[in-house]
Image (spheres, rainbow, N blue to C red):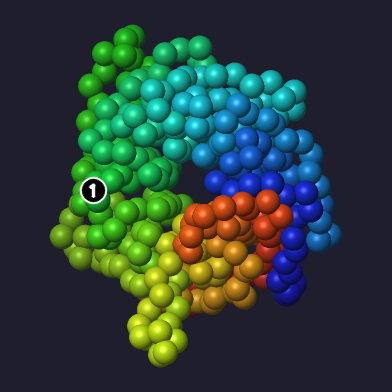
Amino acid sequence: MAPATQFEVSQPPSDVISSVVFAPDNTNRLLVASWDRNVYLYEIAEGTEDATLINKFEHRAPILDVCFGANGNEAYTAGLDCSVKRIDLSSGEQTVLSTHDKPVRCVVYSPQHSMLISASWDHTLHVHNTSAPTSTPITISLPGKPHALAASPSKVVVAMTARLVHIYDLPTLAAALSSPDPSSATITPWQTRESSLKFLTRAVACMPNDAGYATSSIEGRVAVEWFEDTAESQARKYAFKCHRQTAPEEEGGGDVVYPVNALTFHPVFGTFASGGGDGTVALWDAEAKRRMRQYQKFPDSVAALAFSNNGKYLAIGVCRGFETDMEDFNSEGRTKVFIRELGETEAKGKGPK
């Protein structure tokens, strides 16, 4: 079995990392979005510990999220300039798909339905038909400010302020987009829930088997829930503390609590990774309810995580966070992207205790 290896990407962004994501059809292709107003495209050289910067795509304002589209040659971005953009990664051409009234926090692409969903701080979702990019998107009003967004094969989960969670059915959204007058469609959530976490949601990720999702908060906790709305299924949900450190006794003891900034599920084994303001990444077995391993501490806060489409690689975005102070904040020279090539069974769960 090949041992796990890890290396640092050369030519990283110069400011805070907002998102990392691998291509759906290319294990070695990676996008990184940054507050330095650029999206970076890297290619991992097979059999080596190196990732080459292929190109970078400048925007007018900081980029808060990025995702790939139908293949490894197109991407979509969410910007502080309120726009949702498509990037042709081959030509570099950028096209505005829609404009929100306030910054766009998240974008997620559904390959099953050729659909892009954007979530904005103007309390709306825009649902785009990417097969007809010039068409007007459906606008869905939200009761709160969205902070995290994730899609499974059939659902999209929106985590908002005030512990609000809305889950929408993707086939229903696709049917509305294909109707004669999409703008007149009345869209309601498939489910509305109150988050199991008492503090602000920082990240959400959906299980690859379409069974449920995980959320994380600024208060060092992760919750795991299932979509099925039965008493038995809902009884399975749980939350746990993580990404905490013990304070020295001379400082009063207790826990130093860090935000859990990132979550990502392994596409093959269904386990998941979490990354926090404490500079650590941990692997968890959702079914067995236990931590599988914790990696060595990184030099700064872990801001973003992503597994490659086959689970071979884990990308880790590391940069200064706001956990200590914001005075004279400067992340230049401290932003790093690490690529971990996992051992064959490194992310495989061991089953219930």
Give the quadrant of residue 241: bottom left
Question: Alpha-carbon neighbours of circle 1 within 10 Å: few (<14), some, or many (≥20)?
Answer: some
> Which quarter of the image is occupied by the N terminus?
bottom right
> Circle 1 sits on which residue?
162
Q: Residue at x 38, y 67 (%)?
A: 220
Relative depth, front residue between 220 and 168: 220
Q: Residue at x 33, y 46 (%)?
A: 159
From the viewer's perspective, is 52 left or right of 56?
right
Query: Residue 204: percent from the left, percent from the top?
Result: 40, 51
Q: Residue at x 44, y 31 (%)?
A: 103
Relative depth, front residue between 264 and 104: 104
**Which residue occupies the extreme bottom position in the image?**
249
* Vertical order, 265 against 171 (above or below): below
Give the quadrant of residue 170: top left
Q: Is residue 253 visible?
A: yes
Q: Residue at x 34, y 40 (%)?
A: 146
Query: Residue 185: percent from the left, percent from the top?
Result: 26, 18
